[in-house]
Amino acid sequence: MSNELLSSAEMGEADRLTISDGPADGIGLMRRAGEAVAAEVLKRYPAATHIHVLCGPGNNGGDGYVVARFLASSGVGVTIWASGAPRPQSDAALAAAECPIKPRPLSGFDPEAGSIVVDALYGAGLSKPLSGDAVRAVDIATDLHLPVIAVDLPSGVSGDSGKVLGKAFFADTTVTFARKKPGHLLLPGRERCGEIVLADIGIGDGIIARLQPRTFENTPVLWLDHFPVPAVDAHKYKRGHAGIFSGGPGATGAARLSALAAARSGAGAVTVLSPGSAIQANAAHLTSIMLRKTDDIADIEAFVGERRPSAFVLGPGFGVGERTRTFALTLLASQPRDASTRIEGLVLDADAITSFREAPDALFEAARQANAPALVMTPHEGEFARLFPDIAGNDASSKLDKARAAATRANAIIVYKGADTVIAAADGRAAINSNGAPWLATAGSGDVLCGITAGLLAQGMPAFEAACAAVWIHAEAGSRFGPGLIAEDLPLALVPVLRELVAAQGRR
């Protein structure tokens, strides 16, 4: 399964390369696209008696003329409503000439209740809000609750950002071509797409590879090759050691959730690093998780030197302030001299992120040092704005753009959380998660995500892949559990997901 996501510009380049390489030409690609959409319409609505095809003046509209021609040849009643004539001698003009149905002006769009709408007005490249007759068409289809099949992307949704430009159709099905676009996965566009069908129209994998895409849908295809599976001779320290910092006596639960998740995700040893005042509170709830008093920098340095941990979580329930900043900067500078026992990563969340609100550059500079562990930060929208206020406030940017900009500035992996979580690396790679579930919107869920990430880092999984895997696994476990989920359920809910991933890797 291919998981690259193409921007509008990259999709245009894929079309151009396919045409220039031959044997396909522009009208050939258009015919295949229209035929794929028409086949999907007939499959989903075999009893439809009348279908309204809305055609724009560009290539998306050209696809629509092909759709109309194929539907009419299948015996379905078809009306075409056009927002404008295609440019003379264009592929869309040729497609319109091949279609025996005379288009009517979009201004007269007047569908009957119970009919079907094919939206071929504007595709992923739309850059300005819908207006005039197009807005009226959206309103009519919405008010009549007509099923809508969108060609490429529902008109009004930006293919690059997922933003709704003014108004947009709510599609029941969206048929897109070659690869999905970011707007199919980013909110609110994702809610407008309905079920997404990816159609092969002859743009080969080799063409996509030449584009060198840097954006991906976050699925196991992206990271399964790096997923850690213990060797036959593995012992607990070969599987990595994760250290999870605990808050004070009244704020210990978050660390324990992270610790359990790190253990469940495969770390061979996990230690809760607790202030002395909270030792008893933590000890009362821990069995397989180790516990160590950690009150100051000297305690951290002793732990690193003696136990050689490979990943840390700092922030959940820990408290905001100078102590948190000092601990984070110490960990980023605490690399053992022996490269075989290096600290692979530091996961910062919650209080640790907020602690750098007034001094973000100190954190970013520490992360840029040549020997620093990989820094992974997992902010939700509010925390992201505290650390990157200018990036967060740029309304012209998409969530994908913002995550990338933040990752570059911080030299970190940024997990920009939400229903459409974006994971971005400083080298420009980014992934958009698409298996999120509303059941994960519960206190402590993010603490579990941190623990999974640290557990995978501890086992040597590269930081970007570890963060992507953690987000997907976390969401998949939540989706499968469903209603009634609380954070305490998540560590155990990881087990069947992890079991399937290990089996899948074994089959590769």
Image (cartoon, helix red, strand yellow):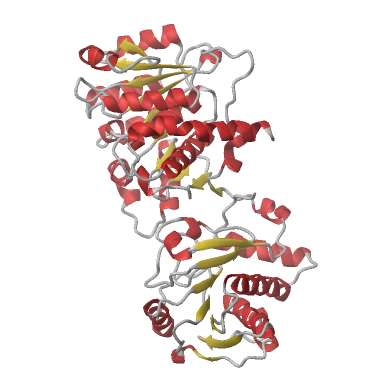
Viewport quadrant of the C terminus: top right
Nearest to the observer: residue 149 or residue 367:
149
As drawn, which residue projects farthest toward the front?
47
Residue depicted at 59% across the width and 14% down the height: 234
Can you tell which quarter of the image residue 245 is in? Answer: top left
Name the side, left or right, on which 205 lies relative to 105.
right
Residue depicted at 36% across the width and 14% down the height: 287
Across and down, in percent, residue 251 comes to 23, 25
The answer to whether residue 158 is seen in the rendering is no
Residue 265 against residue 175 in the figure, above or below: above
Report how many numbered discs are placed on residues in the image: 0
Name the side, left or right, on which 266 lies relative to 252.
right
Residue 482 against residue 78 in the figure, above or below: above
Residue 367 against residue 267 in the figure, above or below: below
Nearest to the observer: residue 429 or residue 55:
55
Across and down, in percent, residue 32 comes to 70, 71
Nearest to the observer: residue 476 or residue 458:
476
Across and down, in percent, residue 103 comes to 57, 91
The answer to whether residue 161 is seen in the rendering is yes
Across and down, in percent, residue 457 comes to 49, 26
Can you tell which quarter of the image residue 278 is in? Answer: top left
Residue depicted at 43% across the width and 30% down the height: 492
Nearest to the observer: residue 468 or residue 12:
468
Residue depicted at 44% across the width and 71% down the height: 156
